Amino acid sequence: MAEVIWLTLKLAGFTTLVLLVISTPLAWWLAHGRSSLRPAVGALVALPVVLPPTVLGFYLLVAMGPDSPLIALLKPFGIRTLAFTFEGLVIGSVIYSLPFAVQPLRNAFQAVGRDPMEAASTLGASPWDSFLRVALPLALPGYAVAAILSFAHTIGEFGVVMMLGGGIPGKTQVLSVEIYRLVETLDWSAAHRLSAGLLVFAFAVMLSLLLFERRLTEVRT
Amino acid sequence: MRAPLLLLLTVWLGLALPASARAGEVRLAVAANFSDTARQIADRFEARSGHRVMISAGSSGQLFAQIHQGAPFDVFLSADDERPARAEAEGLGVKGTRFTYATGRLVLWSRTPGLVDSRGQVLVTGRFQHLAIADPASAPYGRAAMEVLTRRKLEARLKPRLVTGNSIAQTLQFVRTGSAELGFIALSQASSLEGGSRWLVPAADHNPIDQQAILLTAAKDPAASTAFLKFLRGPEARTLIRAQGYEVH
């Protein structure tokens, strides 16, 4: 059981890190870009909110399988599929939780606005510098929300892992799938323990988010 | 005052109409591997009896968990014999109505022609990364697959390469997409697949996959449900079941 919990935390942790990195430029562009493609990309990013995880999982299983042109590129390295691997799950989770990272960051960047960046550049800062030293610190609360949401959402991931994981202990057998398995095999006492743990965890996450948000508004006013 | 009247009316209606003319309803909880076959049998049964059959398919474990929690089912067609026996022991199923309606056979299947030989030697000598099976803890076909591996003393060697689907249906998905090069699936599934390579695992290599049926005590319309179970045992249904790749004894 400890292995399952550790693996779940590891998956959520890696996913959150990857998400924060790739969501930064994406959210910035969605907040401040001028391209007419923005609404379409915004909608694409938000898709996992409404798509059933089974749809996502099914496409990912095919996209990561040996017939996929993506995987053909990896063939020389001895990789014939990314399904059933931890890396494959990270990729799946990143896509699955993408809107939960991008949206808070996008809001944060929008709230920061262009003015502080422009002020910094008139003072001679390079764009990169002014982003790191001006926009990023101002957007930090947005990063906190994005991190908490992505982490929690990945912990709660089920359908994608189910379709893609293959239930390998220590590699792809995460909490939500394990609970399903326990219910199926009638080991309800263990299922109860894990489920109650997740329930408490989810409540703590939502509560801390709300408290965090309230503190932010108190600081601002 | 009103309740006895209603009861009287029900009894009177029940007596007045001959059983065959009264259109009842049978709510079937069917193991996913058997759902297509069950639909075919149900269609014939509906045509003969006038009763209606509603099918809910799922994994046996999931269905049993639901029945345990009072799901509205009349008949349970499990993929194993363990859960119907448990249902009977726990009073969820009617004593004496349990029987084996089909015995499953296991096939080692790959979509790659020539990969699986006719004696299953590929398990010993083959070069593959992933062997797909159904979850041995919850799916009877998965348990049988593990028994095949254990009896050939391949369990320890192949364990790192095993990937498990939560049901035999998902296991099929893994091998059909080629994500796993080969896998143990049900003969009833393999019979609808063209091409590839396969090995029909000898029945003696694992404990029989006896799929059992039982009438549930919560059945709303026991007469219609009993009629369905009788039909399921009859020659017409047996022919259909055999044609789908099951054995019937």
Image (tube, grey):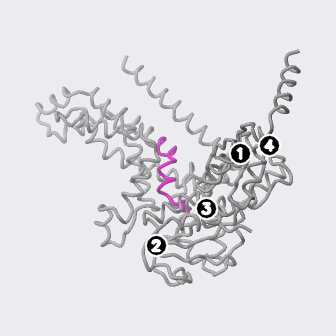
Magenta region: which residues? A152-170
**What residue type is disc 2 on?**
Gln
Q: Which residue is mark 2?
A: B129
Q: Secondary structure at mark 2?
A: loop
What residue is pinned by disc 1?
B49
Identified by mark 3, the residue type is Asp
Query: Which badge, 1 or 4, is on the more N-terminal residue?
Result: 1
Above or below B164: residue B50: above
- Residue behind mark 4: B223
Spot occupied by residue A70 in the image (x, y as percentages of width and height)? 30, 61
- Closer-to-camera residue (B51/A182): B51
Task: Residue B189 in the image: state x and y as whole percent.
Answer: 55, 64
Q: Which labelled disc corresponds to residue B135?
A: 3
Residue at 18% x, 34% y is: A36
**Residue B239 percent location from the top left of the image:** 66, 64
Asked whether A162 falls inside the magenta stretch, the response is yes
Q: Residue at x 66, y 58 (%)?
A: B138
Element under disc 1: helix
The magenta stretch spans residue B66: no
Sequence-wise first label, 2 or 4: 2
